[in-house]
Image: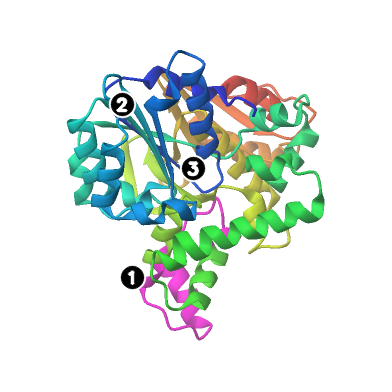
Amino acid sequence: MLKRSMYMNTLIDCIDNGMVKLLVGVRRSGKSTLLKMLIKHMLDNKIKSDQIIEINYEMIEYDYLKDKNTLHDYVSKRVHPSKKTYLFIDEVQEIPEWARVVNSLKVTFNIDIYVTGSNARVFTGEHLTFLAGRYISINVYPLSFAELCSFLGEKSSINKYNDFLDSSFPGIVLQQNKKLKSIMKQDLFDTIFERDIILRGKIRNESIFFKVARFILEHIGSMISINKIRNTLVSNSNNVSYEAVDNYINLMVKSYFLYPCYRYDIKGKEILKTNNKFYVVDFGIRQKIIPNSETNTGRILENFIFLELVKHGYNVYVGKVGRDHEIDFVATKDNKKMYIQVSESIINPTTREREIKPFKQIKDMGDRLIVSLDTIKYKSEYFNHVSLLEFIDIIE
């Protein structure tokens, strides 16, 4: 197993900190593997196997523990009598009122608890108040670009960018057989959509749902209006309500398949509620709905930059500048702020001027970057022009 240092360092720092650790993210992003790595770390550092309890709801043998009282009784009987116990629960969303059970175990025993979940709906709602102020949430994503190169044992290069567009899920990246890789992507697609969205969301009209999904995936990086989606579907003889479209989008977000990027008014210094953008968690899964990966390559590059930023812990917004201009991303982390424009190429003077114009209206002193795939570099007092690989180094 290759160590994912970004996450492992955080988890190790959180051992015995008194908080319940929630690892959340899309299925197969590596949450279960991180738990196994953490258990190995503990065993290598003087924690004994009889102090560790593992429950994985992906496995049939644990189905009977989906009842909260049965689970509580099961753990109670296995708590170490004199030393701290470490409890690991994988796919905790399978337990109704899981937060109530976990909190009861936490306050009753000398226990350190780690759970994973693949649907954000179970990490919201009234039942989570049982853990209010007692948990830390750790977002786990598929591989970053640097992690993908590390997994493949290769140096970063623009060719690896194309590999990234095939998939960034750890298991798929490591699979060299193309046929098996395609099967794995289809299986993951089915799992996310059938189990985490359609089944959990109780979607009855799957045909309309997939039309909404296809619309968003065809327009990644574009401002999305629910009314526009609905009107487009209705004009094509599809009967769907505003509320249904909104619900479908929320279900895709809650399953960590889509990530919203909210608009931020740079001059007014406020987050705007409407016409946000959405980015997909993985391009390989997107291809199962949008087979032609050659289309919209500029928006795909923009999606890639967004993913890299959030995977490295940045808060990311779309920057609104005045009435008519927009900056692709305003990214902040600690005391660092970057204004980022993304373009496949700025060789064309018209394109270059279009990308520069919003920068000219910003008085803030944050870094201003244009990221492109060009081999030619352009210099300007208004921005720093960087290649894709240089950008990766900047945010590391």
Image quadrant where residue 94 sits: bottom left
Residue in the image at 40% along x and 53% along y: 254
Q: Under tag 1, what secondary structure?
A: helix
Residue picked out by circle 3: 326
Type of the residue with mark 2: His
Residue in the image at 44% along x and 73% along y: 230
Residue picked out by circle 2: 80
Residue picked out by circle 1: 243
190 sits to left or right of 13: right
Is 237 covered by the magenta stretch? yes
Q: Is residue 381 visible?
A: no
Of the image marks 3 and 2, the number of the one nearer the N terminus: 2
Type of the residue with mark 1: Glu
Q: Position of residue 244 (x, y in %)?
A: 37, 71
Image quadrant where residue 135 sits: top left
Query: Which numbered mark, 3 or 1, is in the foreground of this view?
Result: 1
Q: Is residue 349 visible?
A: yes
Image quadrant where residue 102 sits: top left
> How crowded is the residue under tag 1: few (<14 C-alpha within 10 Å), some, or many (20+)?
few
Magenta region: 216-245
Of the image marks 3 and 1, the number of the one nearer the N terminus: 1
Q: Under tag 3, what secondary structure?
A: strand
Query: Which numbered mark, 3 or 2, is in the foreground of this view?
Result: 2
Q: Quadrant of the N terminus?
A: top right
Callout 3–callout 2 Cβ contact below 8 Å: no
